[in-house]
Amino acid sequence: MDADSVATLVGDLQQRVRDLPEVDTAARLRALVGRVEHAVKFRTDVTIAATQLEQAANAALDNDPWVLLHRTAAQLLAALNR
């Protein structure tokens, strides 16, 4: 791997670190878990709440700066091991 490619990945890592959140999306996910619990408790359709929870959890992972940092670090390591 050439030095420019490594420098680009290191720059990406630096940006990902700057993007790390002060807080996380736990409040939204907790609210959705609460909806699931409510549906179970009152024996209503859990499917809608569970679907919303699953979608929100996936979105949180897709946009989570920690996950993005990990992906970039893994790309750097893979590039160095070629």
Image (cartoon, grey):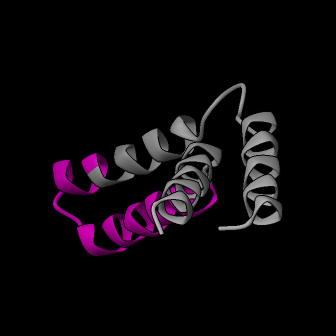
Percent coordinates x, y for residue 23 in the rendering: 66, 28
Which quadrant would the N terminus be assigned to in this image? Answer: bottom right
Q: Residue at x 36, y 47 (%)?
A: 33
Residue 62 quadrant: bottom right
Q: Is residue 10 above or below residue 22?
A: below
- Looking at the picture, tell me which residue is in the foreground, 56 or 63: 63
Taking the spot 36% from the left edge, 73% from the top edge, the residue there is: 48
Where's residue 44, x and y in %? 23, 66
Q: What percent of the width, then of the height, locates residue 72? A: 61, 56
Q: Residue furthest top?
A: 22
Image height of 21 relative to 13, above or below:
above
Q: Nearer the viewer, residue 36 or 13?
A: 13
Residue shown at the point (55%, 36%) measured from the top left: 27
Between residues 4 and 17, which one lies in front from this camera angle? Answer: 4
Is residue 49 on the magenta stretch?
A: yes
Q: In this picture, which residue range is highlighted in magenta?
A: 37-63
Q: Relative to 59, is 19 on the left or the right? A: right
